[in-house]
Image: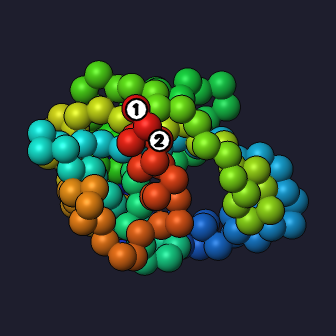
Amino acid sequence: MLHLIPAPLHRALYRLGHGLRRIFLRHFKGEVHGCCVIGRDGEGRVLLVRHSYGPAVWAFPGGGMRKDEDGEAAALRELHEELRCTLAEPVRLGHLEDMYLGSRNRVQVFTGLIQGEPRPDMREVVEARFFALDMLPDNTSRTVRDRVHLLEQR
């Protein structure tokens, strides 16, 4: 895919957009619909990413769902956009709801084996690594443990 905006400027725009979204959600409240991918490798490790915006924490890949977009389609789209890989035989683990900046956050969670080598786009995602479930880094997103719990219940 051809990017017309240089990567450093693109990252800066993601940071700006993230800040504006935080302000909007805090003041206007509402509902956010998203998806999350707990991608695994052949050894059972899970794929975590670091985004170019927001807190410097490890999180699962995923993102917002488009209006009327199927959750699985959104998860596969996000995985491809951010990491140029896909998910073999995606399985929907369920959904989680929590509050995010005063808005209800509804996230559909999927798992499956990662196909292809995850390659961060260096725009939205700047790093991607596999971690054993018992060796997750200390600086993970507040949502990682809840989502791992869904995987462990399966």
| Camera-side residue of 76 and 152 | 152
Left or right relative to 27: residue 132: left
Placement of the N terminus among the 4 image quadrants? top left
Name the residue at the front extreme: 153
Image quarter in which the C terminus is found = top left
Return the x and y of residue 119 as percentages of the image width and height: 20, 53
User: In the image, what residue type sits under mark 2?
Assistant: Leu
Task: Please name whichever residue, 108 or 119, is drawn nearer the observer in this view of the structure.
Answer: 108
Place of residue 104 in the rendered image (x, y in percent of width and height, measured from the top left): 76, 50
The residue at the point 43 percent across, 37 percent down is 153
x%, y% of residue 132? 21, 57
- Of the residues shown, which amino acid type is indicated by label 1? Arg
Query: According to the image, label 1 marks what residue?
Result: 154
Per the model, the C-alpha gap separating discs 1 and 2 is 7 Å
Q: Residues within 10 Å of mark 1 (few under 14, many from 20)?
A: few
> Relative to 118, does residue 71 appear above or below in the rendering?
above
In this view, the residue in front, 54 or 12, is: 54
For the rendered model, the colour scheme is rainbow
Q: Is residue 120 visible?
A: no
Find residue 145 and report its horizontal and vertical position in percent: 46, 58
Say left or right for 89 vs 63. left
Q: Which residue is mark 2?
A: 150
